Structure formats: C-alpha cells, structure tokens
Amino acid sequence: MPPPGLIGFLVLLVAMFAVSYKIGDVVGPVAPGMHSTGTGGGGGGRSDPHGGDMGDMHSRDAG
C-alpha cells in the first residue's frame, strides 16, 4: 500500500487539474478573436489576416 502522503498528493493534483480545466472552460479564450481549433484538418485551413509573421520588429532606431 502506498503511503498516505502520496495518495493525498495525487488526489490534490487531480483535483487541481480538474478545477483549472473547468475554470478555463467557463472563462473561454484568453485573447480576442481566438476560436477553438475544432475537430478537422491538419491545420491547412487556418486563416491569418496578418500573414502569420511578426513583421520587421527591429525597424525602430534605438537612439
């Protein structure tokens, strides 16, 4: 029989994951415009209005 501390830790771990999953499900996406990935495809149907790149992030002068 495993020690009671290990069983308590595993129960606490499972409970924390279950609660955090439920909270995330209730709250929804964290950023505007995020949508669930759905059930289909291999990612080929994603549409990114900005082209998917970060642009030229180093275009400003530091001085």
Image (cartoon, grey):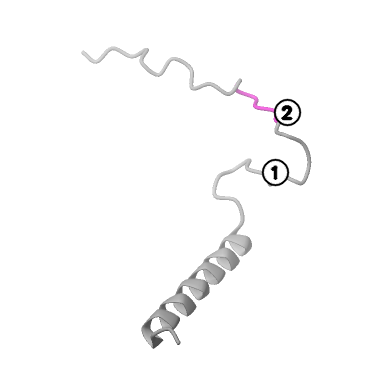
52 magenta-colored: no
Looking at the figure, which quarter contains the N terminus?
Answer: bottom left
Up the image or down, 63 lies above or below 30; here it is: above
- Which residue is pictured at 60% across the width and 51% down the height? 29
Magenta-drawn segment: 45-50
Q: Which mark is residue 37?
A: 1
Q: Residue at the spot x=75%, y=30% of the render?
A: 45
Say which residue label 2 marks.
Answer: 44
Q: Residue at x 43, y 15 (%)?
A: 56
Distance from disc 2 to disc 1, alpha carbons, whole Å, reads: 12 Å
CB under 8 Å between discs 2 and 1: no
**Number of numbered discs on residues:** 2
Is label 2 in a helix, a strand or a loop? loop
Residue 40, given in percent of the width and then of the height, sits at: 78, 41
48 sits to left or right of 60:
right
Q: Is residue 38 left or right of residue 21?
A: right
Mark nearer the N terminus (2 vs 1): 1
Overall secondary structure of the magenta stretch?
loop
Name the foreground residue: 24 vs 13: 13
* Residue 42 percent location from the top left of the image: 73, 34
Give the vertical position of 39 relative to 58 (above or below): below
Residue 40 left/right relative to 5: right
Q: Quadrant of residue 21?
A: bottom right
**Residue 24, placed above or below residue 59:** below
Determine the residue located farthest toward the front in the rendered image.
1
Vertical relation: 4 (above or below) 38: below
Within 10 Å of disc 1 (Cα), the crowding (few <14, some 14-19, many 20+) is few
